[in-house]
Amino acid sequence: MSLLPEAASDFAGKVDHIIWFVTVISLIFFILVSFFLVYFAIKYRRKKENEETPYITGSHILETLWTVIPSILLIIIFAYGFLVFREIKTPPSNTLEINVTGRQWLWQFKYDNGKTTINELRVPEGKPIRLVMKSEDVNHGFFVPAFRAKQDLMASMYTQLWFKATKIGTYDLFCTQYCGTGHSAMLGKVIVMSPEDYEKWEKSEEQVATGAPSAERGKELYVQRGCNACHSVDGTRIVGPTWKGLWGKEEVMQDGQKVTVDENYVRESILEPQAKIVNGYPPVMPSFKGVVSDEDISAIIAYMKTLK
Amino acid sequence: MANHTIAETIPMPYLEEKGLISWLTSTDHKRISILYLLSISTFFIVGGIAALLVRLELLTPGKTIVDAHTYNTLFTFHGTVMVFLFIVPGLAASFGNFLIPLMIGARDVAFPRLNLMSWYLYIAGAIIIIASLLQPADTGWTFYTPYSIRTGTDVILLTFGIFVAGFSSILTGLNFIVTIQKLRAPGMTWHRLPLFIWASYATAILQVLATPVIGISLLLLIAERVFGIGFFDPAKGGDPVLFQHFFWFYSHPAVYIMIIPAMGVISEIIPVFSRKPIFGYKAIAYSSLAIALISFLVWAHHMFTNGISQLAAMIFSFLTFLVAIPTAIKVFNWTATMYRGSIDLKSPMLYALSFIFLFTIGGLTGVFLAALAVDVHIHDTYFVVAHMHYVMIGGTVMGFLAALHFWYPKITGKMFNEKVAKIAWALIFIGFNVTFFPQFILGTEGMPRRYYDYMPKYQPLHELSTIGSWILAAGLFLMAINLIRGLSNGEKAPQNPYGSLSLEWQVPSPPPHENFEEIPYVTDWTYGYGKK
């Protein structure tokens, strides 16, 4: 098992260098202290009562040494850490900007050309990316371990994060600022594509070329669109109602109205979630208007029908 | 008639008077110390059970025993109880109360009735915190806004409990400052004071100056929830970053409220079991004050990824490195104290040595977190969880257990079974490392903290950590049984079983009410081991 995740951004290697540098210095001090602890404990172990011991109360030379040497090392680590931090925090001028919105419990990405994705950030390899981020509700934290990049999202201000991905691949995205029940399900992927593939994807009309709205496609969307953060498919209650056995069920709303779960109810709940709230559940679901297409909704409905 | 006169001249040991009422109304600092010891130990068990449940849930990804919401309430409860009901009052209120008057040659603390009131305030706060379990909060012990304002769980009761318990901390600190300033025996100059007293003094200053800030912050939070005043929620025009500043302005010094008394304990135990004067007395004494002072200026190192400016990050990072220096000095001085000593590896010494060993790991991993670029990667991951437990269990709890075994004969007048104590120590030491060391690696690999569910690739290390928590619990259980058995089965303790030169060991075990028949006249420092 490796100690650090794969390094896939241009400053990841620099961060790792500091980590190894501090590790070596720490190990030296740790080994030094433990060695003397164990060595003294064995060498000077009490063999008989009333052993004579010397009256040593200190040593100016030693104490000065072990104040000055660690101080110098600490200042070096401080400077090293700060210099790389400045680089992490200062985006270059030629960045590609992507807007990031965090909300309980999903990530939404808006690109230059108006495309929107959920829980899936697509970026070209080798191009500096600047994420302009804001939370819509509580604090969230955008963290991609492979990039060694992390930045909180606040509801009170925009925050930014930049990186340059150096390896094509798919990387984990975590929420690191505790945000409630679905915190550990607020996950995503960063997909680093070759510049050509990225351009192709950017220009493509549909977000994903899909065939017929199948239940299988619905199952994919269930994860991709972050439905799984709040709706289980095995009957357990997370935040919203489980999808298991939901189709065709009669639900009681907050105002006492009874509604049967059918195509139009599901469609309305995805596009205008606040229109009808099932009794006993919090009104927290965000709208997916403009994010999921009609075809996607049909696929999700097909998937729901299979969850008996 | 001769017997009668003897009975009159021998003062009554403080444990002699029986009955619940006599305990609940006593203003004797030693009895209040016992009240604290029993209550913080109870809450350590309560918080520990929550921790075991958290670890059990994390044995497998997804649901193991509870759902996500229950898990979130469990780690919130664990953190709140351990921080505010166990480790903050912890050593300071329990052993501080017992030892300060004895060590400085006083009959009691400066304000004995205020001292008893402090304990009642603590219990009142504790009852409110436990009552919040009816609808347990799910905010984490940090209560970050705006989540803590919007969650439907009962945040008000929990934070109000902390608010009330905070007064206990402030008043205890005040009491100790006055006691140490005014009640030292004749000849007990500042530079003759045991280092535990220096540590208690530094802690007391922090308690008095920092605790009001958390009280005010939590009141503002309550006001926002009840009256909708927009302090911290951006939806109402408030600022969530402001809350983080307020919170850490207390909670970072609070870390030192928790650890400095334990450092004081280690400074007492190492010389006794090495039969050597403490190495570099003044450096250790003043480093306690230095740590206390600098600890007020490092709070924003908890906030490096929330969008604070590069300049602020730079300053707070630098100050954080500064606080590492007095801490390192202490570690070197403790180690050097053992040089050419006559070292007796009894259980208190074993706990003290494991403190140095584990606290060094805790301290060095703090250097990683203080380095800005590295903090970006490991902030809010299991690395932080491991680091803080190495400092809080590896440091404070080891110090607490060292103190418990060291002063046990003095407090109870009995001896415990040393062999069992050593076995329990070994289990605790191994269990602790198996639980928390893997979490460093989980953190560097990217596993975020406060996660109910996690990716399968993290499972082996989580399994190891959970198994460790069972070993740790078994060790603590054995340790507790051994100490409890000692109360009834233990041999009678001599006045000074470990050969300490400190004043508390020059009175009978257990000490009489009012400690000293005659206030001692102090002519030398406490650490004159081997002095010709």
Image: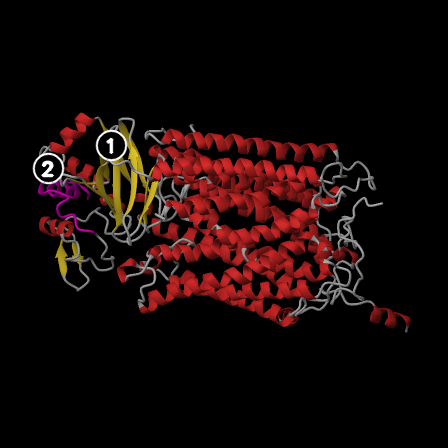
Is residue A2 rendered to the left or right of residue A168? right
Q: Nearer the viewer, residue B516 or B131?
A: B516
In this rendering, the answer to whether B346 lies above or below A168 is: below
* Secondary-structure class at tag 1: strand
- Disc tally is 2
Q: Quadrant of the C terminus of chain B?
A: top right
Which quadrant of the view contains residue A292?
top left
Residue denoted by label 1: A191
Of circles 2 and 1, which is in front? 1
The image shows residue B452 at horizontal and vertical percentages of 37, 45
Outermost residue to the bottom: B1
Q: Judge left or right: residue B23 versus residue A129.
A: right
Instruction: Choose between B235 and B488: the one closer to the eye.
Output: B235
The stretch in magenta equals A286-308
Q: Residue at x 33, y 29 (%)?
A: A10
- Residue under label 2, please give it: A213
> Would residue B266 be found to the left or right of residue B165 on screen?
right
Q: Work out whether B420 lies above or below B190.
A: above
Residue sitting at 43 percent across and 57 percent down? B247
Residue B467, image x, y percentages: 49, 39
